Amino acid sequence: MTAALSRNLLADQAADQLRRRLAAGEWEVGAKLPGETTLAAELGIGRSTVREALRMLAGQGMLRARQGAGVFVERTEPETDGWEAVLQREAIAAVVEVRAAIEIEAARLAAQRATDADVAAMRRALDLRAAAAAASDRAFVEADAAVHRSIVAAAHNPVLSELFETFVPRVADAMVEMIGLLGLRDRDTEPNSDEHAALVDAIAAGDIELAARISRAHLEAMAADLA
């Protein structure tokens, strides 16, 4: 616990230093920040702590990570909790509402219809999600989506599967935005892992009501975070 608190404190301090450097104009909007190794050496901290600090600033709207390209400056002052942030939260909340409409029923049907092969596929997806814990936000979201895809597939409803696949790109973008907005991985690189495992266990056990209840609670908590 002490080590974790120390690391979090260092990340906060690093974020403050980077925030001051951004405000001073060291990097202009659109500029690419130095890599994690360089920043770690400059700040005298580890790369994982630098990564946490960068995520904090991304959550404030100051930075944005681009897959395979690096971290870029979005603004030199923290984003105020104004209309832009409100509209972003509302857009993500709308996606979560549609997820609930699809995924709660998918969990219920999967608990009724899942085969041994379906359950095996769900557990493989859980393992891949865990393996993506240290990956980028986008890669982690894609691994998370694969778990939900395996559950929808286990519902054995082709229309539901088609609807989910059409919706997945929108979900992925919203979840990446939500991670940055709320800093969901600042302290936990594998959020909600227990809930996902419990959902798969309920489906494997054929417990229809429990599966639906876990799915509903997960999505309601997500909606509450955005309120």
Image (spheres, grey):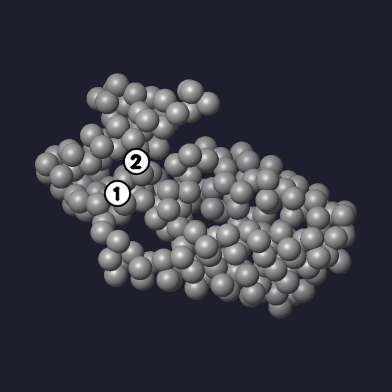
Question: Secondary structure beneath disc 2?
Answer: helix
Residue at position x 23%, y 41% in the image:
19
Where does the image place residue 50, in percent across and percent down from the top left? 35, 33
In-image side of 79 versus 216 (left or right): left
Question: Secondary structure beneath disc 1?
Answer: strand
Residue at position x 44%, y 42% in the image:
186
Where does the image place residue 10, in percent across and percent down from the top left? 35, 28
- Residue 59 in sight in this render: yes
- Residue 30 in sight in this render: no
Q: Earlier in the sequence, mark 2 or mark 1?
A: 2
In-image side of 98 versus 113 (left or right): left
Q: Is residue 157 above or below residue 210?
A: below
Residue picked out by circle 1: 63
For residue 54, the mark is 2
Question: How far is the residue under mark 2 from the one under mark 1?
Answer: 7 Å
Residue at position x 75%, y 65% in the image:
212
Where does the image place residue 182, in percent across and percent down from the top left? 43, 53
For residue 214, the mark is none
Tell me whether the residue at label 2 lies in contact with that at label 1, contact meaning CB atoms closer than 8 angstroms. yes
Q: Amino acid at mark 2?
A: Leu
In-image side of 23 versus 57 (left or right): left
Residue situated furthest bottom in the rendering: 159
Residue at position x 36%, y 44% in the image:
56
Where does the image place residue 58, in percent across and percent down from the top left? 34, 49
In-image side of 173 versus 120 (left or right): left
Q: Nearer the viewer, residue 56 or 144?
A: 56
